Amino acid sequence: LSSRARSLPMELSEKRGVENNGFVQNEAFEGKETDTSSQREMPDKCSVDVDPMAVEETVLKPYAGMPKEVLLQFSSQARYRITREILFWLIIAGAVALVCATIAIIALSPKCLDWWQDGPIYQIYPRSFRDSNMDGNGDLKGIQEKLDYITYLNVRTIWITSFLKSPLKDLGYGAEDFYDIDPIFGCMKDFEDLLVAIHDKGLKVIMDFIPNHTSDKHQWFQLSRNRTGKYTDYYIWHDCALSGGSVTPPNNWVSVFGGSSWQYDDVRKQCYLHQFGKEQPDLNFRNPDVQQEIHDIIKFWLGKGVDGFSFSTVKFLLEATHLRDEPPVNNPPSGGTITAYSQLYHDYTTTQVGLHDIVRGFRHTMNEFSREPGRYRFMGSNDDEKEDIEATMMYYGTTFIQEADFPFNFNLINVKNLSGNSVFEAVDSWMKNMPAGKWPNWAVGSPNAARISTRIGKEYINVMNMLILTLPGTPVTYYGEEIGMENIASGNVSEEHVNSGPVVVTLPEKSPMQWDGNVNAGFTEGNSSWLPVNSNYQSVNVEIQSAWANSTLRLYRALTSLRNDELPLNRGWMCHIWNDSNVFVYVRELDGLDTVFMMVLNFGQESAINLQAIVPNLPCEALIRLSTPFNKAGKVVTTKLIQTETGEGLVLEYKTAKPVHTMEAFKEKCFVSEKACYSKALNLLYMPC
């Protein structure tokens, strides 16, 4: 110790043991080994001189590696305790604020659009899309070869029509085996490879399923006609009179294809019901075992990885058990026979009580596979009720009990006498009858309807595509409509092209996809195709339209890109502005955005319209964002005079602080599904508005 320290007395507590010479400043001990036997015991008390200031500095100054006892001396001091408490409560407050903000964002955020809402569905008839093995028939490998083209279209979902094993009596809609692929399309391994490739591209796939009937070659039917076990009542059998080779059916029911719905079976000695072809006996859905079989089939394909189903012919699943005659539309002449489906009101063979319980059962089974995030399974119903829009809307289900995500909408396909008025009526009918909060869809082509170019004229193909891609909801495009394919001439279709017996469905709209100008339009490298390609394939094909700036294909792709990029077109309001015999005008808007898109679509003759006189506060000018003649895109037009020619469509863009859907005059003309509002400050969508 220093001489100053020795001047101050300090008592040290008694310490047992020997003196530690390491603390004695004695140079004589340096380098020497201590002999403990010569050490003396420390006295109980001794006095040393210590500088208090030095002690205070030594004890109270924090240093790195200080022991817990020293650290606790400082932690209890006010300046450290208060700072620590402030930091603690700031952290707690920040965590609470973060949790509250997260809850608020979740509560206020609108539901994200699901994959089946977020982009077009592309419907493929597989036998006509692409042949990979040169046998003249399109197949599953052919679809896989063309997936890059489908992504080029900005399509989100592929809908593949029936490819199950079938005698192909009606081109695959009467299954012989619900668990297998028809060899004409490939094998199960081909399908599994296709599924993997589709999902690798970020796409989804839905498939057709026809539960109402099977093929008469199906094992169930063979067992049923022999009255084998539980299969005895898998189909609808009834006694019928047989006299002199002539059969008297149980009632006057008529099949969709004409003629009696009853067919006598020589094995069972009874008649079975078939609402379609005689080779397609109807299943008995009042039998619980049949319903379970269908649920097992659904589970099988969902287990394979299919993302959804389009259930067809579901309105035929149940028939009245009393078997009364159906009432005729008009009283037949005395002695006349009813043979056409259109001659009867089908009160006892369609949409019977209990039907929607069965459909809800399908939904329940599909929901079992929808629990994994991002793997929601889509369900559509494919029944064209035509005049009975209310019956169609029932397939949406109710507010509390879900059925289909949407019934497919054929209103635009069924339009007769095309005009601005008729198109408006088709759109308005669906939107006004659709249950609140449900999602619409639109189609202008299908495997069972003439192609747009043939049905209404090739001059309307672009404006029809513009219509379905700018309306709210999911657009459905039948393969080839994106390039304006036409029906082949009916005279070019014969039984030799089908190789399956009598043809009971139409074929001209199922001609092979036109990929390029080579032989057979690039559909097959074989010598022939199952149906002849259209004679215009050298000018109407994917290859040439991909390179031509003003083509139908390039416009289709520009429209799908615009739809994906612009929120008002993706999920905003749709307000009807005007319609007459020539044009149909509507806008798409989103709360919080001042950008508005106005569609002016001509389905009649050359027209000029003053939109400023119709819409208050409409800007004087608007930008043509897209048009059916590409050379108009990017130009500015005056809204006092919008001129369009036959089949012309314009997508106008303008900005306004007073959107149409907020105007009292248009309140009853506006619709919205999956409503959302946009915040410019936060750059996000929120609810409520």
Image (spheres, helix red, strand yellow):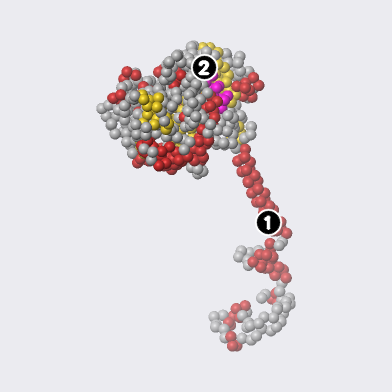
Q: Is residue 461 magenta?
A: no
Residue 607: x and y in percent read 51, 12
| Quadrant housing the C terminus | top right
Q: Residue at x 66, y 51 (%)?
A: 92
Give the magenta part as a residue range: 422-434
- The answer to whether residue 98 is above or below residue 526 is below
Kind of residue sitting beneath label 2: Ser
Helix, strand or loop at label 2? It is helix
Left or right: where does residue 27 sit relative to residue 408?
A: right
Nearest-to-viewer mark from 1 and 2: 2
Q: Residue at x 48, y 24 (%)?
A: 325
| Quadrant housing the N terminus | bottom right
**How many discs mark residues in the rendered view?**
2
Left or right: where does residue 658 sit relative to residue 232?
A: right
Kindly indicate the quadrant of the structure image that contains residue 516.
top left
Q: Is residue 426 magenta?
A: yes
Kind of residue sitting beneath label 1: Arg
Residue ID for mark 2: 422
Residue 553: x and y in percent read 41, 24
Residue ID for mark 1: 84
